[in-house]
Amino acid sequence: MIVYLRSGGKLHDLLKPDVDQYTRRVETHEGATLIEILGELGIPLAMVAFAFADGKVRKLEYVPSDGDVITIQSPVAGG
Amino acid sequence: MVLSSDELERYTRQMGLPDWGEDGQERLRDARVFIAGAGGLGSAVALYLTAAGVGRITLCDPDTVELSNLNRQVLYSTSDIGRGKVTAASEHLVSLNPAAAIVPQSYRIDTDSAPDLVAGHDIAIDCLDTLDARFVLNRACIALGIPMVYGAVSGFTGQLSLIHPPTTPCLECFISDKSPTEMPQVPGCTAGMIGSLQATEAIKYLIGIGRTLAGRLLVVDGMGPRFDVLEIERDPDCPACGNRAE
């Protein structure tokens, strides 16, 4: 199945977008969690605080469906 | 107590807003707000809440003003370098609005200090600069039943939410415990934008107007620009507010 990962900021370079400036098309297997998908892409989990898809914040254990667009967020802690 | 003629004139350009009125202004005057952190976010929050007429503001930060703060921490001037932040900030805020009671607290937020510092306030504003300190404030607010306006920035991105369990998720429901190791780059415009939105959330909550970000997270990407408002859900296993809470 295909999912689309989006990111800006620090994660942008690791994600290596190929669809547009922010988005990478990723082929993965049914039932894969975000943790597994990020692992396959070589993106360190410590650099991802959470993700969001379909208007909701998702934890990294989230299992995407075919065609999902998932935005990953790096930890943001500055004040 | 009714508003004085001075107060009526000072706030005349906001009290005419729908549902604000003299009642709303009196609620702000009677409010006690705790601002954790007097950096980029805290500068904007403190300035706007003081200008809006919040009666009592506790500003908590142990640091001194440094030259590298001045790109974003608009509460301070070059002449403040080396001074305690909360001391310098209090002077500036009182000159902006002499009716405001500004309480400087030069303490670091940790598990020992947080409960006593936050107690007695109507709302806390999280303007801290590490996830560890934010989690400490989050837990203190949960224990005291005090709502917390979460705000954070890095680069041109920012996040914002109103945290008030059990009505809403808490910070640890949706953010994994991973502290960034690098000090983030933060342009003043990003801190000002998110700080202004934090002040807006606090005013809405204190007056009881509009719809707050309770149960929702605003994610801002200033480069897009893009503003996403996302639903966030409570985690029943959250170590701070869920079944596993200590």
Image (tube, coloured by chain):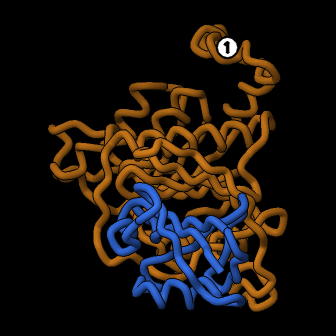
**Residue at image x 71%, y 25%?**
B25
* Location of residue B196 in the rendering, given as x and y in whole percent from the top left corner: 52, 38
Chain displayed in orange: B
* Location of residue A35 in the rendering, given as x and y in whole percent from the top left corner: 57, 88
Place residue B180 in its image quadrant.
bottom left
* Location of residue B235 in the rendering, given as x and y in whole percent from the top left corner: 76, 79
Chain displayed in blue: A
Looking at the rendered image, the quarter that the N terminus of chain A falls into is bottom right
- Seen in the picture, residue B218 relative to B108 is either above or below; the reply is above
Is residue B211 left or right of B180 when viewed as pictured? right
Q: How many labels sit on residues? A: 1
**Residue at image x 44%, y 56%?**
A20
Residue type, mark 1 in image: Ser
- Crowding at dot 1, Cα within 10 Å, few <14 / some 14-19 / many 20+, comes out as few
Nearest to the observer: residue B44 or residue B90: B44
**Residue at image x 42%, y 25%?**
B96
Nearest to the observer: residue B231 or residue B57: B231
Is residue B66 left or right of B50 when viewed as pictured? left
Is residue B218 left or right of B215 when viewed as pictured? left
- Seen in the picture, residue B103 relative to B236 is either above or below; the reply is above
Nearest to the observer: residue B41 or residue B38: B41
- Seen in the picture, residue B236 relative to B21 is either above or below; the reply is below
The answer to whether one can see residue A79 in this image is: no
* Location of residue A25 in the rendering, given as x and y in whole percent from the top left corner: 51, 70
Residue, disc 1: B4
For label 1, the SS is: loop
Nearest to the observer: residue A4 or residue B64: A4
- The answer for which chain carries disc 1 is B
Looking at the rendered image, the quarter that the C terminus of chain A falls into is bottom left
